[in-house]
Image (cartoon, helix red, strand yellow):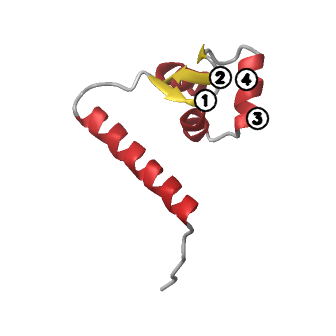
Amino acid sequence: MIITQLGRDEMKQLFREVVNELLATQIQASGQSVEFVTSKRACEILGITSRTLQNYRDQNKIGYSQTGSKIYYKVKDLHSFLDRHYIKAKA
């Protein structure tokens, strides 16, 4: 068994991530949809860095909405982006 000691900031971040995941799961289970996500969540969904996400935004590959300095992405746009870049396996 491995025991890891987390600092205060690491523990807060872990707690935030767990709460966000629980809320997202609860929303999905209730039949509602999460229409917009933050840049951080968009990076997680696409499996890319924030810099790559910014490049995609700058190249108009992914749509976004901006309020002040905060940027949001439609979940359906992220899934469409993944679908457009899907490579089928050869049978």
Label 4: few (<14), some or many (≥20) within 10 Å? few
Q: Position of residue 33 (x, y in %)?
A: 34, 25
Q: Secondary structure at mark 3?
A: helix
Q: Nearer the viewer, mark 1 or mark 3?
A: 3
Q: Give the CA distance from mark 2 to mark 3.
A: 15 Å
Q: Give the CA distance from mark 1 to mark 2.
A: 31 Å
> In this figure, which residue is indicated by the disc labeled 1?
86
Q: Amino acid at mark 3?
A: Arg
Q: Earlier in the sequence, mark 4 or mark 1?
A: 4
Q: Amino acid at mark 1?
A: Tyr
Q: Nearer the viewer, mark 1 or mark 2?
A: 2
Q: Earlier in the sequence, mark 1 or mark 3?
A: 3
> In this figure, which residue is indicated by the disc labeled 3?
51
Q: Earlier in the sequence, mark 3 or mark 4?
A: 3
Q: Secondary structure at mark 2?
A: loop
In which quadrant of the rendered view does residue 81 lie? top right
Q: Position of residue 21 (x, y in %)?
A: 40, 45
Pick whichever, 10 or 54, lies toward us.
10
Q: Earlier in the sequence, mark 1 or mark 2?
A: 2
Q: Give the CA distance from mark 2 to mark 4.
A: 17 Å
Label 2: few (<14), some or many (≥20) within 10 Å? few
Q: Give the CA distance from mark 3 to mark 4.
A: 9 Å
Report whether 21 appears left or right of 88: left
Label 3: few (<14), some or many (≥20) within 10 Å? few
> In this figure, which residue is indicated by the disc labeled 4?
56
Q: Could you tell me which residue is drawn at 27 percent across and 39 percent down?
A: 26
> In this figure, which residue is indicated by the disc labeled 2?
69
Q: Secondary structure at mark 4?
A: helix
Q: Could you tell me which residue is drawn at 45 percent across and 49 percent down?
A: 16
Q: Could you tell me which residue is drawn at 61 percent across and 37 percent down?
A: 43
